[in-house]
Image (cartoon, rainbow, N blue to C red):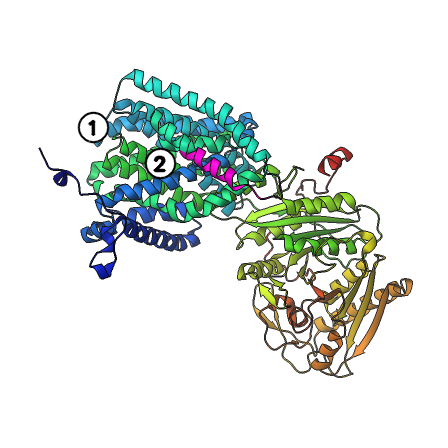
Amino acid sequence: MATPNSTCPPPMKATSNGAFQHENPLDYALPLLILQICIVVAFTRFLAFLCKPLRQPRVIAEVIGGILLGPSAIGRSKKFLDTVFPKRSLTVLETVANVGLLFFLFLVGLELDFRSIRRTGHKVLGIALAGITFPFLLGIGTSYALRATISKNVDSTPFLIFMGVALSITAFPVLARILAELKLLTTDVGRIAMSAAAVNDVAAWILLALAIALSGSNTSPLVSLWVILCAAAFVLFATFAIRPILAIMAKRSPEGEPVQEIYICITLTLVLACSFVTDTIGIHALFGAFVVGVVMPKDGPFAGVLIEKIEDLVMSLFLPLYFVSSGLKTNVATISGGLSWAMLVLVILTACFGKIIGTFLVSLLCKVPFREALALGFLMNTKGLVELIVLNIGKDRKVLNDQTFAICVLMALFTTFITTPIVMAVYKPARRGSPYTHKTVQRNDPDTELRVLACFHSSRNIPTLINLIESSRGTRKRGKLCVYAMHLMELSERPSAITMVHTARNNGMPFWNKKHDNRDQMVIAFQAYGHLSSVNVRPMTAISAFNTIHEDICTSAHQKRAAIILLPFHKHQRFDGTMESLGNSFSSMNGHVLRHAPCSVGILVDRGLGGTSQVQASDVSYTVVVAFFGGRDDREALAYGMRMAEHPGVSLAVVKFVVPVGKTLAFGAKLIGVTANEDKKVIEVDDGSTYDEEKQQDAQFWSEFLIVCCNSSESIMYEERLVESKGEIIGALREKNKSNLILVGRMQPVAPLINRSDCPELGPVGSYLASSEFSTSASVLVFQQYNPKTDVYPLVMEVSDYMNMPDTPTRSPGREARAI
């Protein structure tokens, strides 16, 4: 009889006494686990950074990281493997990884909304079933080839089902992020792909449960039948016993109040308890956690709070461990010889052919256009974490040997990697729209409807935005001001991003919120204002990575025929009056919008216009100042100020800066402007037809303003200020620093008022007005008027015969009553 030490190493103690006690920390479980987590997280994040330019989802980097740390690459060094990932530590590593995986699959269950699956149409259902059936049947065919070559002596039935499931899975979370990355979420292709993937997800889990039930060590059919029956009974128990408990806790967690800690504790304990039950049944602990997530009520803040509590820890630390645990079992070196490589090619071709061709053919039968059908095929071929879970369960149950396991892992990696570049090549929907006239606030007919796309990314922006809109509606009749309030939300790698994706997908193009019971409190604020005022307000939500969210803003502005886009400045004012940056991503977003906008743009420097709450119409009392230096941007600012002056609570003061004959506002400085393609260009102010033309247009518009001023002598005042230096301009502006709002153009032929600025998007005057040395109370709105000559890189191609979808908000009294 062999001694215990000859068959397995002794168990590791938890903690060491330290290096000073001559003990190696890597011989103890806890310090070794900490080191493993640090190495895994750092390595996979580094790979994710390298894969980002290729627009690959993070799961690709994590799978590659796991494989590279395993015996396929770095782990080929026996010293590295024995030091960092010794065999006696793998039990602890896999246990921690699987605990993290339990809670991740609970989050996956939370993402899955059965109501949207029930609403799936026959076309999507047919495409989803084709995307499962074709590759499943081909997977069974491939399994015969594998059993005859590299997988001899395996139990046939479980092997057939495992291979069928492995080839037919579509990774729902990975697919959602690829669609968002490619801006396809709200296209027809995106909607069909997401709905089909949700159906596919449910079918895959059912098939996996069946495969596990049939793959136990006891091959008796009666045992498998008992496992299946007990699993079905557990699902019924979760639906009719656990769901009501969760519903009660969700009901007792109203919006706006903190969720009780005991409810969080009960839910997380339920996840672990159900995992124990399903493991006892014999269908793996993961199913219990997934089922609890599925039956969890999705409405109200309770589910959102749970996601916030769990996701960061699980996604950042525990989940990468599972990929490494999988990578340590993957040895690419086992794929050796012509036969093995032929089997790898066969598995990849079978997986791609089944998914792509099956989905493609059925999509064509459902009258989906050719390019869209082909894109759908590649999108449905996306694999991810669930694929790895299937393969790992198959390997643990001795259904898949080392060689087959490595082949299937590489197949999953390859099929997911090719999805983004091929879909970009096959299907990049051209953003088209019909031309429209009113792309600026300044227009020949001021009585036409003004459409505004007001963007915000936090609740801090809302009171000022609403107060600005209220003071901009003037005395015009209902419908003359139409506002689209767009909530800008960052799409991240977190599971909660998929919950946002659901909202975007259900709400339609471009992320409209048609459901009046929307849980987004920031959107509700605008909805309430719209119901109580004479302004048409249509809330929207844009969900995208911040480096590309300007595309959503600009395309939405064009589709809504907006005359101006209002953007929040990338800095906010602290209590001590200093301006604090919210991050470079917001500044970069504003810069991209300025370059690509299909209409005028206004950047709002918020210093609390009207205070921290919405001001009632009867209480509006603002002093608005327009600093007019000349140029198209200043004309736009003056046009907006003239509109604001129509409100009985707004007093407008216009300061026109003039210089002595023979001088210019540049005062000898060499002016640099930024063109649409980011090239720096010297602005000529002394001569040239463009400058003369601008002067003529300034004079013409100023004369129009004087006529309006004569008719509104009480609410509009103006003065012409003669200035001979930059200091006199600063002095004149400081006289107005106690006003509520200052309107100014972005690019004027004026010498920069401050020597250094990190806000080039505000221009020479706006940069000074946004600085702390100017004011701590006056908000600033900096305008850039749309100029068709500089619109050289439009994100939307205008086509005269293109039919736009209806873009005017329509509301019925019944729906208004329900919303309030």
**Main secondary-structure element of the magenta-colored stretch:** helix
Q: Residue at x 30, y 41 (%)?
A: 94
- Amino acid type indicated by mark 2: Ile
Residue 445 in view (yes/no)? no
In the rendering, at what x and y percent does residue 489 appear? Answer: 57, 49
Relative placement, left or right, of 483 versus 167 is right
Q: How many marks?
A: 2
Circle 2 residue? 389
Closer to us: 539 or 373: 539
Q: Magenta segment range?
A: 255-272
Q: Residue at x 18, y 43 (%)?
A: 10
Quarter of the image where one finds residue 657: bottom right
Question: Which element is circle 2 on?
Answer: helix
Residue 141 to residue 642: above or below? above
Residue 124 in magenta stretch: no
Quadrant the N terminus occupies: top left
Relative placement, left or right, of 221 versus 531 is left
Q: Which mark is residue 180?
A: none
Q: For the view shown, which residue lies furthest in the top direction?
A: 222
Relative placement, left or right, of 778 versus 11 is right
